[in-house]
Image (tube, rainbow, N blue to C red):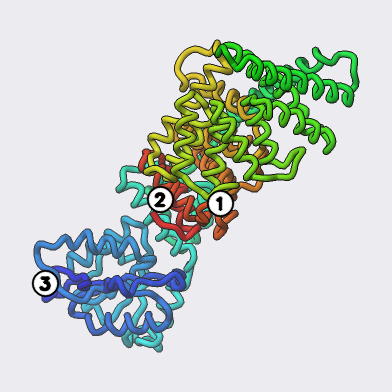
């Protein structure tokens, strides 16, 4: 990069120059504590300026100087203005030549406009020439043998200059930093995403308040910048309070819904077992279910399922008995679970599709029988062959995860698609996951979102037929419904389903609702980093930056899932890229990428 320079014609007649460092010589991160000094001088004083530059560099200062001429068409004011704004202190080499220079006078005025500290150094007698008006009230530092000053000369002048430069060092460095930030904010149209935030605002206010008496005043622009940052922070804080109130209300509604569901299930159980204790109640349920499942299965064999309505009626009764048994599954001991397994095994062997599916789930989870993915696959296949769409979806999950079979996303997609075509919401959700992750199909976020929304509508139609209007208008009801829909599934399956819906709601900019869903998923599967990713995103877009940052920086270098072995920071970077593509941005994203060492 060529050095910056003033106009050639003025250079010949003693115009000033400052040294502009080449890009390769910009200070590294370890040199950020150096004071930046802009040396303004006349061409006639070039040798002195070189000596001063070398001396100050040797003492650890970073000098900005310009050595070469510029053509008449160059915008030297903008370039030199940038150098002056970047400098912490202006050292003006005062001589008869620089005192007469209009450009030197302009540099002094520009430094004064930016409230920069100016230190005039007298390299030779002025010979009766008056210096620029702004310098007349300042104390000069003499670098030549001034008869009126005993011991004056280059060495004494340099020592005095270094002492002056080191005075108020830290405060002046901050003056330059805040000026740069304020100018970027102002020239960019004063956007809110370039303002200070959090503790930075308090530090800026403290900086302005502790100005040393010998230091220049903060500029009006700097004060405007700090004031605007404080006002924006207050606005954000108010919005966060409203969001927290919304979250609290949503959480209360969620707890109410869960409580109502539990009360309804408890009431249904109590209605069937009013006069028995807990142990006898479970035994009676098992006996009733065994009769129902086995009896209906035997009836199905005898009748040969001659009428479609007979099959549907039988399946509905078995589903009801199944729901009762599974409600008390967590309270069962090993003996009870073995009895439960025997109930569904009898129904499955009699050809009942619902019993086949539940038998597959028990083999999968190892309840009442040793865990066996291969056996789970066998019974899910039998249930699917009977037309049970939930069995199709469960079988697809085995192929997707490589459990009991070789991992095969294509086969999983076929099964999820078949279940989805039959109106199965879980099949739609699982198919959406494949499209979101590009597994067995071309990656397609739009298709994934479409499937998640279809799953939501499907369950909304089943669980809340009284709800009218668009799905978007009933998004809170949809969340409650999804929690209810997934409540009888296994913990990991429920958590992953909720995570998928949370991502969909996040893309729809329903940040508070996405956080509620992610919190529910975390409660079911607390060790899932994939769920923590969604929680971090929701908190960031809600403006809860401190809490979000804790999440974002908690798992650097850890794999998010065993399936694809992607590291935490890689997943964050990919999600941020998707958000930007969808028009979702946050000022925090760039900071998170920087701290995680990821890039756009």
Per the model, the C-alpha gap separating discs 2 and 1 is 47 Å
Going by the image, does 575 lie left or right of 309?
A: left
Residue 413 image offset from top left, x and y in percent: 45, 39
Whether residues under marks 1 and 3 lie with C-beta atoms below 8 angstroms apart, the answer is: no
- Image quarter hosting the C terminus: bottom left
Q: Is residue 8 above or below residue 598?
A: below
Of residues 9 and 236, the one nearer the viewer is: 236
Q: Earlier along the polypeptide chain: callout 3 or callout 2?
A: 3
Local packing at callout 3 (Cα closer than 10 Å; few below 14, some 14-19, many 20+) is some
Going by the image, does 175 lie left or right of 407?
A: left
The mark total stands at 3
Q: Which residue is drawn at 64% across and 28% down?
A: 251
> Looking at the rendering, which quadrant does residue 355 occupy?
top right
Secondary structure at badge 2 equals helix
Per the model, the C-alpha gap separating discs 1 and 3 is 65 Å
Q: Earlier along the polypeptide chain: callout 1 or callout 3?
A: 3
Res 209 visible = no
Residue 368 image offset from top left, x and y in percent: 77, 38
Q: Which residue is drawn at 42% across and 55% down?
A: 178
The residue tagged 2 is: 222
Of residues 56 and 300, the one nearer the viewer is: 300
Per the model, the C-alpha gap separating discs 3 and 2 is 35 Å
Res 132 visible = yes
Of residues 424 and 182, the one nearer the viewer is: 424
Going by the image, does 369 lie left or right of 383?
A: right
Local packing at callout 1 (Cα closer than 10 Å; few below 14, some 14-19, many 20+) is few
Going by the image, does 44 lie left or right of 90?
A: left
User: Residue 298 — which label?
Assistant: none
The residue tagged 1 is: 561
Q: Is residue 60 above or below residue 480?
A: below
């Amino acid at each position: 990069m060529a050095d910056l320079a003033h106009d050639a014609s003025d250079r010949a007649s003693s115009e000033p120059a400052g040294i502009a460092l080449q890009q390769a010589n910009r200070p590294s991160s370890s040199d950020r504590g150096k004071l930046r000094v802009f040396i303004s001088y006349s061409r006639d004083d070039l040798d002195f300026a070189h000596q001063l530059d070398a001396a100050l560099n040797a003492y650890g200062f970073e000098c900005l100087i310009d050595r070469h001429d510029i053509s008449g068409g160059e915008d030297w004011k903008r370039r030199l203005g940038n150098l002056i704004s970047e400098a912490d202190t202006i050292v003006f080499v005062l001589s008869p030549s620089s005192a007469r220079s209009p450009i030197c006078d302009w540099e002094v005025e520009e430094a004064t406009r930016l409230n920069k500290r100016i230190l005039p150094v007298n390299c030779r007698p002025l010979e009766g020439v008056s210096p620029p008006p702004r310098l007349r009230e300042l104390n000069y530092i003499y670098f030549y043998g001034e008869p009126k000053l005993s011991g004056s000369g280059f060495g004494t002048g340099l020592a005095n200059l270094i002492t002056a430069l080191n005075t108020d060092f830290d405060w002046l460095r901050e003056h330059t930093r805040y000026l740069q930030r304020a100018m970027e904010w102002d020239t960019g149209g004063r956007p809110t995403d370039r303002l200070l935030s959090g503790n930075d605002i308090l530090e800026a206010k403290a900086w302005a308040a502790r100005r040393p008496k010998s230091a220049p005043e903060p500029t009006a622009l700097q004060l405007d910048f700090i004031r605007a940052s404080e006002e924006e922070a207050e606005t954000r804080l108010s919005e966060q309070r409203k969001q927290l109130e919304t979250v609290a209300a949503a959480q209360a509604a969620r707890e109410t819904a869960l409580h109502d569901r539990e009360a309804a299930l408890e009431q249904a159980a109590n209605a069937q077992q009013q006069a028995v204790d807990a142990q006898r109640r479970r035994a009676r349920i098992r006996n009733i279910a065994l009769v129902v499942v086995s009896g209906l299965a035997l009836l199905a064999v005898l009748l040969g399922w001659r009428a479609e309505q007979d099959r549907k009626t039988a399946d509905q009764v078995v589903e009801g008995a199944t729901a009762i048994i599974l409600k008390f599954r967590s309270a069962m001991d090993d003996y009870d679970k073995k009895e439960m397994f025997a109930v569904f095994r009898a129904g499955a062997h009699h050809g009942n599709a619902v019993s086949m599916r539940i038998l597959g789930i028990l083999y999968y989870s190892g309840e009442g029988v040793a865990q066996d993915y291969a056996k789970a696959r066998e019974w899910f296949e039998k249930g699917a062959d009977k037309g049970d769409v939930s069995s199709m979806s469960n079988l697809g999950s085995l192929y997707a995860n490589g459990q009991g079979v070789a991992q095969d996303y294509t086969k999983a997609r076929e099964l999820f698609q078949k279940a989805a075509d039959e109106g199965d919401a879980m099949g739609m959700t699982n198919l959406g996951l494949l499209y979101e992750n590009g597994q067995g199909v071309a990656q397609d976020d739009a298709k994934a979102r479409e499937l998640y929304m279809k799953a939501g509508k499907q369950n909304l139609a089943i669980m809340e037929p009284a709800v009218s209007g668009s799905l978007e208008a009933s998004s809170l009801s949809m969340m409650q419904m999804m929690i209810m829909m997934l409540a009888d599934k296994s913990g990991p399956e429920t958590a992953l389903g909720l995570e998928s819906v949370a991502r969909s709601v996040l893309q729809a900019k329903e940040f508070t609702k996405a956080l509620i869903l992610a919190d529910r998923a975390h409660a079911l599967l607390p060790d899932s980093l994939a769920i923590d990713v969604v929680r971090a995103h929701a908190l960031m877009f809600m403006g809860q930056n401190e809490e979000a940052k804790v999440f974002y920086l908690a798992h650097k270098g850890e794999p998010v899932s065993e399936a694809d072995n992607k590291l935490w920071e890689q997943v964050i970077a990919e999600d941020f890229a998707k958000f930007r593509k969808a028009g979702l941005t946050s000022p925090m994203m760039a900071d998170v990428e920087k701290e995680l060492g990821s890039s756009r």
